[in-house]
Image (cartoon, coloured by chain):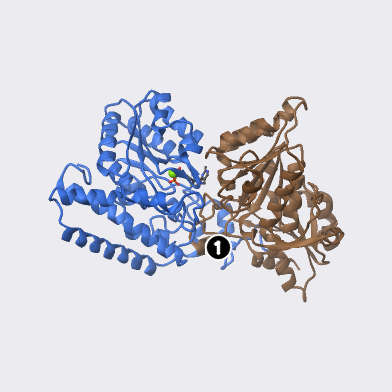
Amino acid sequence: MTAQAEIERAEETEAMTVREAIRMGLREELERDEDVYLMGEDVGKFGGVLEVTSGLWEEFGDERVRDTPISEAGFIGAATGAAATGTRPVAELMFSDFMGVSMEQIMNQMAKMRYMFGGKTEMPVTVRTTEGGGMGAASQHSGTVHAWIAHFPGLKAVAPGTAAAAKGLTKAAVRSDDPVFVFENKMIYEQQGEVPTDEEFTVPLGEAAVEREGEDVTVVATQRLVGESLQTADSLADDVSVEVIDVRSLYPLDTETIADSVRKTGRLVVADESPLSYGVHAEIVSRVQEEAFFSLDAPIQRIGTPDTHMPFSPPLEQEVLPDGDDVREAIELIT
Amino acid sequence: MADYTLETEEGRREALRRMLTIREFDSTAGDYFADGEIPGFVHLYIGEEAVGVGACAALEPDDYIASTHRGHGHCIAKGLDPKLMMAELFGKQDGYCNGKGGSMHIADVDSGMLGANGIVGAGPPLATGAALSIDYDDREQVAVGFLGDGAVAQGQVHEAINLAATWDLPAVFVVENNRYGEGTPVEEQHNVDDLSDTAGAYDIPGVTVDGMDVTAVAEAVEEARKRARDGDGPTIVEAETYRYRGHYEGDEQPYRDEDEIEKWKEQDPIDRFSELLVDRGELTEEELKELRDEIEAEIEEAVEYAQDAPLPDPSEAYEDMFAEMPPEIERFASQARADGGSLGGDRR
Ligand SMILES: Cc1ncc(C[n+]2csc(CCOP(=O)(O)OP(=O)(O)O)c2C)c(N)n1
Ligand SMILES: [Mg+2]
């Protein structure tokens, strides 16, 4: 379904930022289900360093909005153990770069318990984290690591590009009985969008959204690059008709929506901030060539970070950070 | 001989100079951050000067330190050049890390400074590693790992101290207990009363000292250094201190009140130490004023240097990933847009 149709179907919408949309999703889920609680570093009184959870501690109290010590291995592990024993923790990893500290519990416990135990345990844990460059935050606070999780069997990963997707995916993640990682890009917290206010609105895991319909070329984008691709598409509208898809769910991935679009346009640009080698781009390209090889009219283009870390100094950061101009250049190259 | 030691009049004056330099450097960095000239985040060390300076006064010049996100004070205490530091904070090519690191990753391995760190608790394992190479090579140095109170809750800190203790490595762990990890008070992060109590788990000495007293810190670290050099392994030195500014610049600090800050300021480490030197007749008020003026001018000069230094060329972004550039990065670099970003495919 196109994103427009999804929004139109909603009875009521409200304009809000991505940050507010995530907070609304969390608040609704905390209200809906007593088994749900939040935990992480400074998510309570402080309101989260990027202010996503601000106000929730005042509303729900210490038990349900829990500040943890600076112990990612411990509290992500505890979230895993808690999820296996009947509660539904939503953990915040302040920056995705800190995921390395907690990786053992993610890879060997969270991802594997259901399978190793012959299906005898549920794993309803949600991990929210923030990714991406653009803030001058340097190499240890700017990484885009969602490909690690999308790659690892047993974990689900979502990465919203709009406010509506941010709310809907957050809620779907909390309701899922599987481990779901929500990758929020820190540069789009202030991005505005129309968001359904219906408490039952969710974005099902595994569904991409066509954000803009077009005929000549498909841009499959994630996170910040969704908005930038839409702007690029608008600016090129006189010359080329660009279809823009927000991937939304990295794993499971909506191959059908992407392949259908490529069958129509014959051209594809994949834009995702991850490092280019061995990642999200490669997966999408592989699936498209498996499903729609004979529809392709031009080589597929990838836009991403050129296998470096995010440097501190602004001219260096701008150099490696992919943006809407890169998308434009790729479109111009193949149309 | 150490760079400076609290045992001589000259050394004490140098310690005071470094504490004053840290304060001036950091308050200036705070101003330029507020103006938008310094990008990213900065975490200031103001209020905690006695810890870094006291600890480094007990070290020899070629000893190692591994620092934290709040690292400017450690750099200055260890003798790094404020000009090159400021240039790094401004993201300039002439900075210590050629603009790639910034405040949170400032490092000068040649001076024994193994880097500030963006990962809480990541310094102690590096200090254990430095102590391992010292031990392996039979060198005369020690390695100091600085960490915050919050970092004591990190698993890798526990592992690092246990390893150093088990192998009797020449390491010292200096816990800067400034009462908070971001907005969370130390009592809400730990069950022990004193963070040095954790030493019992490793069967090594743990001491808690007044971190607003540069002499007390220096004495404790000196003893720890001696023990480390004698082959008896690490010590945990907890210094009780306080940060005057927010966790980072821009922090609105809903978690504490002005009274608490004022109360700690009565213990100001620079006032206490300078008063001590004046009382002992080692320093006159006049000389103290001269020293302050001198440092103010030095930091002003550092800012000018940083402002005038060139920004790195965008092509530098592709350098330093490996000893030699692999073909992947070479290809991305050669196809890079002048204004950033990268295309993965051959442009045919
Ligand atoms: C592994 C990791 N988790 C969380 C953070 C975010 N963070 C940065 S500083 C900080 C507080 C550190 O507290 P403390 O160790 O007491 O040092 P202080 O800031 O008080 O000097 C936190 C939580 C981080 N940088 N790394
Ligand atoms: Mg602290």
Who's the residue at 68% across and 47% down the image? A182
Question: Along the horizontal axis of the image, is B208 left or right of A205?
Answer: left
Q: Tell me where residue B31 appears, x and y as whole percent.
A: 41, 64
Q: Tell me where residue B197 appears, x and y as whole percent.
A: 40, 29
User: Is residue B70 shown above or below B177?
Assistant: below
Give the residue type that dot 1 points to. Glu
- In the image, farthest residue toward the bottom: A238
Q: Colour of chain B?
A: blue
User: Is residue B74 shown above or below A109?
Assistant: below
Give me the chain letter of mark 1.
Answer: A
The yes-or-no answer for disc 1 within 8 Å of ligand 1 is: no
Q: Which chain is in brown here?
A: A
Mark 1 secondary-structure assignment: helix
Q: Quadrant of ligand 2?
A: top left
- For mark 1, what is the residue? A319
Q: Tell me where residue B282 appears, x and y as whole percent.
A: 14, 51
